[in-house]
Image (spheres, helix red, strand yellow):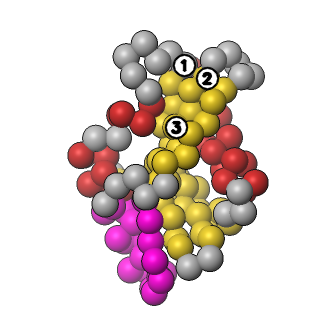
Amino acid sequence: MAKHLETGKKAEALAAKFLEEKGYEIVFRNYRYGRAEVDLIIKKDIFLVFVEVKSLTNTKFGNPEISVNKNKVRLVTKAADNFVYHTNWQQQIRFDIISITFKTETEFEITHFEDAFY
């Protein structure tokens, strides 16, 4: 597997653990609808949260979260709409970003942006 794919999988696992420790329940990982994908779908209280996980090993050109552009937002919301429709979710939804910067193989920094877009 390519290095960037390994880093992405590691970031998603770290994000899931981080969110579980904050009291969120993981509902779905890597939900796909056509070309659209949501990295994590989590739940807490009345919120169903769609999470985009971004990671980098080098912040020379900016932090990971800046790569969530209009196209990515469009794709995530498309998949989220499909998930909400098919599960008949009737409460609140939210879109978050988890940004992970790897300083070394074992040292990293996580930032959670709640209600990041939509």
Image-quadrant location for residue 93: bottom left
Q: Residues within 10 Å of mark 1 (few under 14, many from 20)?
A: some
Residue 89 magenta-highlighted: yes
Residue 27 percent location from the top left of the image: 62, 67
Q: Are marks 2 and 1 in contact (CB under 8 Å)?
A: yes
* Residue linked to disc 1: 57
**Secondary structure type for disc 3:** strand
Residue in the image at 67% along x and 63% along y: 24
Residue range in magenta is 77-95
Amino acid found under the numbered disc labelled 2: Phe
Question: Does residue 74 appear to the left or right of 62 in the view shown?
Answer: left
Q: Position of residue 14 (x, y in %)?
A: 68, 40
Q: Secondary structure at mark 1?
A: loop
| Left or right: where 63 falls relative to 11 | left
Q: Secondary structure at mark 2?
A: strand
> Label 1 sits on what residue type?
Thr
| Mark 2 / mark 1, whichever is N-terminal | 1
